[in-house]
């Protein structure tokens, strides 16, 4: 019976440690105010194209501008989880150079409460930013007079367009075999389970550890219980033989 109470107490403590919220310091009102501010933060991307002497194609990246927020918030940006603070900017505007290196997907920007608040380190919300595609063909001489066509628009997805197909399409345009096309919208690339797990690792890893520990405690409890039962049975058999 004593082991049973210790087992239940251990599980209760584990849950308490994993999901503890310090209500005395981080109030619901303050969290709501931070969420409201986080939803009003402005994010804007700016395409930067560079000449690369070692490649036949241009190199490109996207700068990021963050504005309309206070020192109560900070951000985790991009696949390298770069941390951006209010002090990194001027007058509440932050310019992040080469924040993103490829286009055509949604990237998460995690917004946290800073140490200027009572909710320091709390994940307030996750915003998602659409990163446009970059069409390498758009700067080609062949596209000079055909910017209204998808094949020559700067944010068209041409990842699967070969040189042969590009030239063939341009030739059709010249011969009036193609009608003017409408703007294409980038499609979000699907993420696998591991990417989603790692993206939210500050939540998923503690939960995983907690589950593993609970399973370990349960296994230990039942193994220990069975050992005692076997011992009692053996002792009972020995008494009978005596």
Image (cartoon, rainbow, N blue to C red):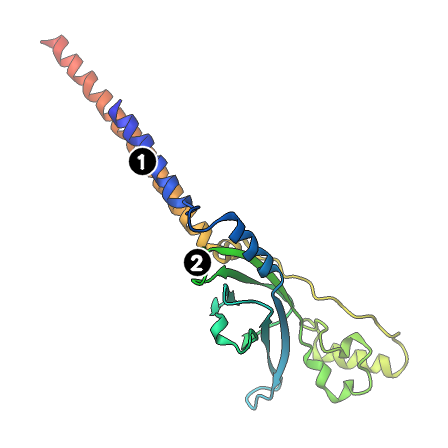
Q: Mark 2 packing: few (<14 Cα in 10 Å), some, or many (20+)?
A: some
Using residue 210 as the reference point, say whether residue 229 is left or right of it.
left
Helix, strand or loop at disc 2? Answer: loop
Furthest-right residue in view? 176
- Coordinates of residue 190 in the picture (x, y in percent): 61, 58
Using residue 122 as the reference point, say whether residue 179 is left or right of it.
right
Q: Nearer the viewer, residue 56 or 129?
A: 129
- The reply to whether residue 100 is in sight is no
- Coordinates of residue 105 in the picture (x, y in percent): 63, 65
Q: Could you tell which of marks 1 and 2 lies nearer the N-terminus?
A: 1
| Relative height, residue 36 to residue 5 (above, below) | below
Helix, strand or loop at disc 1? Answer: helix
Residue at the (67%, 71%) spot, across then down? 132
Q: Which residue is mark 2?
A: 120
| Relative height, residue 170 to residue 126 (above, below) | below
- Which numbered disc covers residue 10? 1
Residue 70 falls in which quadrant of the image? bottom right
| Relative height, residue 107 to residue 207 (above, below) | below
Q: Nearer the viewer, residue 106 or 241?
A: 106
Q: Nearer the viewer, residue 219 or 31?
A: 31
Using residue 210 as the reference point, say whether residue 231 is left or right of it.
left
Residue at the (81%, 77%) spot, across then down? 149
Furthest-bottom residue in view? 53
- Coordinates of residue 192 in the picture (x, y in percent): 55, 55
- Coordinates of residue 93 in the picture (x, y in percent): 57, 75
Q: Mark 1 packing: few (<14 Cα in 10 Å), some, or many (20+)?
A: some
Where is the N terminus found, in terms of image quarters? Answer: top left
Residue at the (52%, 57%) spot, across then down? 195
Q: Give the CA distance from mark 1 to mark 2.
A: 28 Å
Where is the C terminus found, in terms of image quarters? Answer: top left
- The reply to whether residue 158 is in sight is yes
Using residue 171 as the reference point, say whether residue 221 is left or right of it.
left
């Amino acid at each position: 019976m004593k082991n049973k109470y210790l087992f239940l107490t251990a599980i209760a403590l584990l849950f308490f440690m994993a999901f503890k919220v310090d209500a005395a310091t981080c109030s619901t009102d303050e969290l709501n105010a931070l969420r409201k501010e986080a939803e009003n933060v402005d994010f804007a991307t700016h395409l930067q194209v560079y000449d690369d002497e070692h490649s036949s194609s241009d190199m490109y990246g996207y700068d990021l501008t963050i504005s309309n927020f206070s020192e109560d918030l900070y951000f985790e940006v991009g696949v390298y989880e770069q941390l951006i603070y209010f002090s990194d900017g001027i007058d509440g505007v932050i310019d992040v150079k080469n924040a993103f290196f490829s286009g055509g997907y949604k990237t998460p920007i995690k917004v946290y409460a800073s140490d200027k608040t009572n909710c320091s380190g709390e994940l307030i919300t996750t915003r998602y930013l659409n990163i446009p595609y970059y069409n390498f063909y758009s700067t080609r001489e062949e596209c000079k007079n055909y910017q209204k066509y998808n094949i020559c628009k700067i944010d068209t997805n041409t990842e699967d367009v070969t040189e042969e197909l590009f030239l063939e399409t341009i030739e059709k345009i010249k011969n009036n075999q193609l009608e003017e096309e409408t703007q294409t919208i980038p499609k979000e690339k699907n993420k696998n389970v591991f990417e989603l797990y790692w993206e939210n690792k500050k939540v998923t890893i503690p939960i995983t550890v907690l589950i593993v520990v609970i399973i370990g405690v349960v296994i230990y409890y039942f193994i220990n219980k069975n050992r005692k039962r076997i011992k009692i049975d053996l002792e009972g058999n020995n008494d009978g033989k005596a």
